[in-house]
Amino acid sequence: MFASRSLAGLAALSALLLVPPASACLWDTDTLWQERQAWPGTLELIVGKFPRHTDEFYEHRVKDRQSKLRLHAAGEQEMTPEQRAAAWDDLAVALDKLGRRDEALAALDRKQADVGEVGAYETAANRGTVLIHAGRYEEGLKEIDRALALNPDAHFGRERIQKLLVEYLLERKGDAEKVPLPLAPSDAETNFAVFLHKRGVSIAEGRKGVEGMMRFGDYRSPVLLEALGDLLSTSGKSGEIDGSLPRRLAGRAYLAAGRAAPEAREEYRELAVRPLAWQSEDGKGIDFEDFSQRLEREFAETEAWFEKVREDEELWVAVSPDPDARFREKYGVAVLRVGDTSARPNSLQAQWSAKRSWALDVAVGVGGALTIAAIWGLIAWRRRQPNGWDAN
């Protein structure tokens, strides 16, 4: 009998943060692993349905990396400088994800004191990002410049877009005490897409950079969501809305920004209306209330799905010696889709595993049948020739 196999559900990677005024890229053990995954869809990034950890997981990572580094310092566990540098980066990123930014900066200082210039790029990139998350933009830019000097192509060039986004934010902020939200209201003459175009950066490059910052930084940042909406709804050549652009995604990005920054909800709603105004065959636009409710259902689906991730990670932290490995074993190269609530894995790895399992079942079944047939054939032959081979 062939074994029946059920496919397990997938989930994701998270840091539930208070929304900072801006967000950027961080670099830790997960980053290289995530770089190999297919980029999730833009809608999935907007609502947060992509592989991400929970706060509970990051709390575990803080304790785990601190423990390893203490054991090394006490001479009870050998670690190479590269291993220590990676542990310090993991610790700093986990602390930043938990909103403990002063501790994250202190961890990076201790990393530099411990391993010197080992992992110097990661130190600068992480310090710059943590400072930006803390609202210390000018200090953060200096560190990002240092990181770019050390490794201009890291993160597939996303740090260049990160630097430009912070410069754009500072330009829009001016002398104000707080960052204004939205950065570019509906009556503004420019937005982030136009800002990039004037500096010779394509819409595609900008979008890739912003989506990367959402994935590795904070997908709920209103600044990032607004920037994404600008890039999805604006032609870099003319500064006007292009009929071929994904307006429904742009509208979702703006509404999600308002969801993350309730004090600016109405302003972001106005931004969302513009790209949606002609999004229908009759030219009358779409039902905005229905559109908003659809987005809320997509958020609700994501939140329900993420609760399953929380259950998994709480279990792994409690009983597994290596929660990181358990996470990767289960989720692999997960490709998640809004609207898919089947709880089936949807990745090349999962599909290959299923095919391999089916092929193995077939091979075992056929092999077993052939073995049984051979045994019965041998028994029949022995009965005909009880003394072995015929001597005639």
Image (cartoon, rainbow, N blue to C red):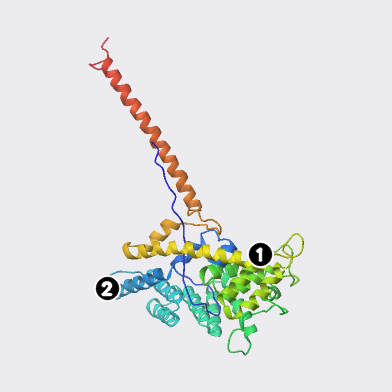
Q: Position of residue 220 (x, y in %)?
A: 54, 72
- In front: mark 2 or mark 1? 1
Residue 31 shows in this picture: yes
Nearest the eye: 70 or 374: 374
Amino acid type shown at disc 1: Arg
Amino acid type shown at disc 2: Gly
Picture quadrant where residue 296 is located? bottom right
Q: What residue is disc 2 on?
A: 75
Along the horizontal axis of the image, is 340 left or right of 82?
right
Residue 248 got which mark?
Answer: 1
Q: Is residue 352 above or below residue 49?
A: above
Nearest the eye: 315 or 292: 292
How many callouts does the rendering have? Answer: 2
* Label 1 crowd bin: few (<14), some (14–19), many (20+), radius 10 Å: some
Q: Position of residue 70 (x, y in %)?
A: 31, 75
Quadrant of the snapshot with the N terminus:
top left
Picture quadrant where residue 366 is located? top left
- Element on which disc 1 rests: helix
Nearest the eye: 249 or 113: 249
Along the horizontal axis of the image, is 63 left or right of 39?
left
Q: Is residue 140 above or below residue 64?
A: below
Residue 95 got which mark?
Answer: none
User: In the image, what residue occupies the spot 30% across and 72% down?
Assistant: 72
Q: Position of residue 338 (x, y in %)?
A: 55, 59
In three-dimensional space, the C-alpha distance between marks 2 and 1, rounded to whole angstroms, equals 57 Å
Q: Is residue 271 above or below residue 43?
A: below
- Element on which disc 2 rests: loop
Q: Position of residue 49 (x, y in %)?
A: 52, 63
Residue 49 shows in this picture: no
Along the horizontal axis of the image, is 105 left or right of 188?
left
Of callouts 2 and 1, which one flags the residue occurring earlier in the amino acid sequence? 2
